[in-house]
Image (cartoon, grey):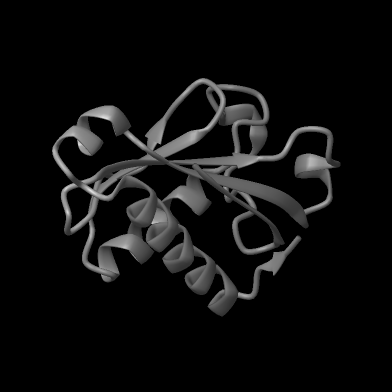
Amino acid sequence: MSLIRFSSEQFFPTLPEVVMSEEGAAGFELALFVAQALAKAGLVVTYPLEEDWCWLVQATTGTRVGLCIHCVLEAGEARLASGFSRWCLSVIATFPLLHRLRGRPVSAAVDETAQLLREALDEAGAVFE
């Protein structure tokens, strides 16, 4: 697993919090950015999927390693009131044991995908911790 923590104004929700299915469930804009960045890099991705506590993007690498990228606004912050928010992405392999048994490099795929996301976020002006 790889965690990416950063601050950015770019992914602030465009819709008011009252229309979100879960209070404070921001992250769609970030998840859409993640999906587009990974698709541009050649990964097969899903559209953002809403979960109870985050937005999720699923991706498959060229080595056929399945990944889940969780996009969440970090708790304990001034959250939606400030407009400048702290975000967290977690990149994890799905079914890591199955991938290892098939000889697919799980940790390398996670690290490479996390690096792709860091580069895309850096270009978008994110401030990393």
Query: Residue 86: percent from the left, percent from the top?
Result: 74, 50
Instruction: Say whether residue 86 is left or right of residue 41.
Output: right
Query: Residue 85: percent from the left, percent from the top?
Result: 75, 52
Instruction: Say whether residue 121 is left or right of residue 97.
Output: right
Residue at 23 percent across and 59 percent down: it is 43
**Quarter-wise, where is residue 76 in the image?**
top right
Nearer to the camera, 102 or 77: 102
Nearer to the camera, 45 or 22: 45
Residue at 70 percent across and 62 percent down: it is 9
Nearer to the camera, 72 or 26: 72
Nearer to the camera, 50 or 19: 50
Instruction: Say whether residue 66 is left or right of residue 76.
Output: left
Query: Residue 126: percent from the left, percent from the top?
Result: 65, 68
* Residue 115, above or below 34: below
- In this rendering, the count of numbered labels is 0
* Residue 122, above or below 38: below
Q: Residue furthest bottom?
A: 123
Instruction: Say whether residue 112 is left or right of residue 76.
Output: left
Image quarter hosting the C terminus: bottom right
**Quarter-wise, where is residue 125 in the image?**
bottom right
Query: Residue 51: percent from the left, percent from the top?
Result: 45, 25
Residue at 65 percent across and 34 percent down: it is 17
Residue at 28 percent across and 28 percent down: it is 97
